[in-house]
Amino acid sequence: MILRSLRSQLLVWLLAPLAVVAALDAWVAHHGGVTTATLVHERLLLGSARTIAEQIGYSEGKFVISIPPAAIEMLDTGNQDHVYYRIDDPDGHLLAGYADLALPPRSIESEAWSGFDATMRGQPIRVVAFAQPVSGEAAGRPVSIEVGQTLAGRNILAREIWRHSVREQFMMLLLVGGLLVLGLRGGLKPLIALRDRMQRRTPFSLDAIDVGSVPSELQPMVAAFNDYASRLTRHARQHSRFIADASHQLRTPLAVLNIEIAFALRQDDPAIIQEVLRAIRGSVQSNIRLINQLLSFTEAEADFAPPSRREPITLCPVVCTVIEELASLAQAKSIDLGFEATDPSVRVMAGEHLIHMLASNLIDNALRYTQREGVVTVKVDTAPDGGVLLQVIDNGPGIPERERERVFERFYRVRGSDCDGCGLGLSIVREVANTCDARIELQGTSDQGGLTVSVHFPAGEDVLRVVDLRSPTELSAPYPRTGAAAT
């Protein structure tokens, strides 16, 4: 089950390592318990062997052996363990005890001892061998005393030591867990306070949160929220202003269209009705173009695709398609429309639809604002910094330098312009350019007028060059001109 509580997640991340450490400590404690129990067991066996050794003497050419009961009783643990002993003379001959008790793996020096594991009658035992020098005629030659015992008592002692250690570890883990719960409850109070502040906000409140009143760990999150709220506020204001401007732009044409229809309904002369219908058709076409540009602007403003979702687009074919679509408009005004490309294989990182929208609005603006029998040239070139340059050059009235920044505003039109535009074309171009990380510039073509609109696409990984499917000569040569030159 996924833990959705931050407190629960913190407890898990804190207690899990502690539990692992406790498990490792329990494993170490088990080995430590076995070692301690073995050491205690060996000391008891060694004490029993010394007690027996103290009762060994040598008289009249033979060893005198007496096994005191205390030597055996001290090994009684109440666990029904079996005790075995063996006494050998200096020559290794059995003097007393069990002959089948295992001998020590190596010789033992006088007054030294050694502990080792063995098996006696199918049961594992622990044996201690002790070398005891004997006074008398046999002085200098030690007697070997071995005492062994089964391991039931030792194992029980090891388990008790291990259980005691595990019990302490478990109690410590519970204590630490309780302290962590209390600590987290106090440590999460600022986060809970921030949550309460957010819940008390009104539904439409986008005011910034005071970053200084929250802990430093939460400040990046609060700063990100404030930034998002600021961008959302700005977008909401722009959206509201756009709706208001769009409503204003549509109100007048629709009112004019309504007047024209009412006027046509009152006429009986077919010639006048035909003239009014032509006017209505022009109004409808203007409104259709306005609505299409409004939709295009909304789409361009919302289409901020991240760089990872863009794809390389060959620029020249898209521009050629736009020129073909607008050729009829150029012919209607007898405008000489042409295309030039020094490198037809250049590509830019963008969406094909965005590039089509950008080029369509640029060329459409140039054709609409250029006088009859004018010249409009579209160029695709490589910029000095390695980027890609898309230029639309016309010899129309141009834009005064003081107004070149304002023409990017929505619904702004240059004073004195008699074109039927609505002031959205360059706004759409700028939104698309921003989406593609491109830069747009306006320059005068000559002292007599004209305008050059340059869109500079960035260089580097965003610009690629490939071989186009069409022949290089077909795209590198000027595009077949339309309008006056064609006729």
Image: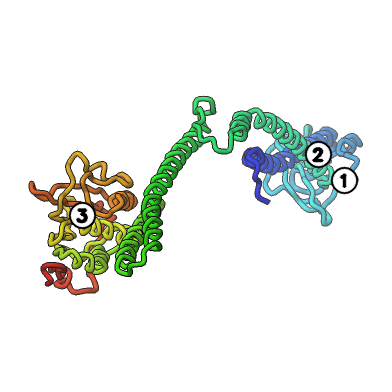
Residue in front for this viewpoint, 398 or 254: 254
What residue type is disc 1 on?
Asp
Q: Circle 2 sits on which residue?
A: 160
Quick check: 414 left or right of 221? Answer: left
Q: Earlier in the sequence, mark 2 or mark 1?
A: 1
Secondary structure, mark 1, is loop
Packing grade of label 2 (10 A; few <14, some 14-19, many >=20) is: some
Please rate how many residues cluster around mark 3, counting C-alpha atoms within 10 Å: few if below 14, some from 14 to 19, many from 20: many
Quadrant location of residue 286? Answer: bottom left
Name the residue nearer the viewer: 8 or 266.
266
The answer to whether one can see residue 466 in this image is no
- Look at mark 1 in the image and give the residue it sits on: 81
Instruction: Tell me the SS state at disc 3.
Output: helix
- Residue 469 x %, y %: 24, 73
Cα separation between marks 2 and 1: 17 Å
Q: Position of residue 294 (x, y in %)?
A: 38, 54
Q: Is residue 259 something one can see in this rendering?
A: yes
- CA–CA distance between discs 3 and 2? 99 Å
**Seen from this angle, which residue lies furthest front?**
268
Q: Quadrant of residue 131?
A: top right
- Label 2 residue SS: helix
- Name the amino acid type tagged 2: Glu
Q: In front of the other: label 3 or label 2?
A: 3
Look at label 3 and name its amino acid: Tyr
Q: Which residue is mark 3?
A: 369
Residue closest to the eye, 313 or 303:
303
Q: Residue at x 19, y 56 (%)?
A: 392
Which numbered mark, 3 or 1, is in the foreground of this view?
3
